[in-house]
Image (cartoon, helix red, strand yellow):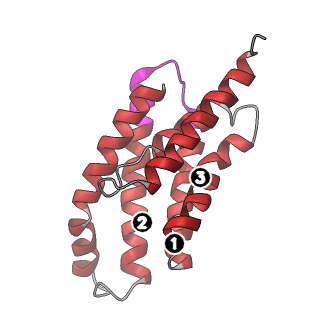
């Protein structure tokens, strides 16, 4: 039986989703997962025709969080929203242009870094509520950002 292009895409995204789920559950460097690249890919290839493509990363996050554990709702909402933005970026990307695709991965990682660390500063008691506290939050998160950016670029290159 020969698969249609759409069936192949759903199968490929399904395989990537299962792998992304597994990567989140296995020990790994902090923030070094394929989830950002999966969101970008699902947005680029599925969300143009099927709204489900926007929510693939959120499903993976939710089901893996069932095993990993949930935390503060406000922080999780920002994390989930950031991955939804990856999918939206993917939806508008000209996927035939490798530089634009890598730019989408870079943009998603930068937005995730800025949004989630702002949320940690704003919603947690860990940082003083001042400009210096915000800058400390961003500074201490740089190793996580480097790891996420490396994973996003690596997996985006592999998926696209």
Kindly tell me whether residue 91 is visible in this rendering: no
Q: Which residues are magenta?
A: 90-104
The x and y percentages for residue 34 are: 44, 43
Kindly tell me whether residue 120 is visible in this rendering: yes
Circle 1 is placed at which residue position?
69
Look at discs 2 and 3 and give the one toward the viewer: 3
Q: Quadrant of the N terminus?
A: top right
Circle 3 is placed at which residue position?
60
Q: Is residue 69 left or right of residue 54?
A: left
Number of numbered callouts drawn: 3
Q: Earlier in the sequence, mark 2 or mark 1?
A: 1
Q: Are marks 2 and 3 in contact (CB under 8 Å)?
A: no
Q: How would you rate the neighbour count of disc 1 (Cα within 10 Å): few for under 14, some for 14-19, many for 20 or more? A: few
Q: Residue at x 54, y 77 (%)?
A: 74
Q: Above or below — where is 41 with respect to 68?
A: above
Relative depth, front residue between 51 and 1: 1
Q: CA distance from mark 2 to mark 3?
A: 18 Å
Dividing the picture into quarters, in which one does residue 29 lie? bottom left
Residue 97 is one of the magenta-drawn residues: yes
Q: CA distance from mark 2 to mark 1?
A: 18 Å
Q: How would you rate the neighbour count of disc 2 (Cα within 10 Å): few for under 14, some for 14-19, many for 20 or more? A: many
The x and y percentages for residue 130 are: 28, 84
Residue 132 is one of the magenta-drawn residues: no
Q: CA distance from mark 3 to mark 1?
A: 13 Å
Q: Earlier in the sequence, mark 3 or mark 1?
A: 3
Relative depth, front residue between 88 and 72: 72
Q: Is residue 97 left or right of residue 18?
A: left
Q: Earlier in the sequence, mark 2 or mark 3?
A: 3
The x and y percentages for residue 21 are: 53, 49
Q: Are marks 2 and 1 in contact (CB under 8 Å)?
A: no
Give the label on residue 116, or none: 2
Q: Above or below — where is 66 with respect to 111?
A: below
């Amino acid at each position: 039986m020969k698969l249609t292009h759409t069936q192949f895409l759903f199968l490929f995204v399904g395989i990537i989703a299962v792998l992304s789920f597994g990567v989140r559950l296995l020990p790994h460097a902090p923030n070094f997962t394929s989830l950002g690249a999966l969101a970008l890919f699902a947005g680029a290839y599925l969300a143009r025709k099927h709204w489900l493509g926007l929510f693939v990363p959120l499903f993976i996050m939710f089901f893996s969080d069932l095993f990993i554990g949930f935390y503060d709702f406000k922080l999780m909402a920002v994390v989930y929203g950031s991955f939804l933005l990856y999918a939206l970026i993917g939806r508008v990307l000209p996927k035939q242009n490798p530089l634009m695709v890598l730019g989408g991965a870079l943009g998603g990682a930068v937005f995730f870094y800025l949004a989630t660390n702002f949320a940690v500063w704003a919603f947690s008691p860990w940082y003083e509520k001042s400009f210096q506290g915000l800058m400390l939050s961003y500074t201490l998160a740089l190793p996580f950002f480097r790891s996420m950016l490396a994973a996003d670029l690596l997996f985006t290159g592999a998926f696209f």
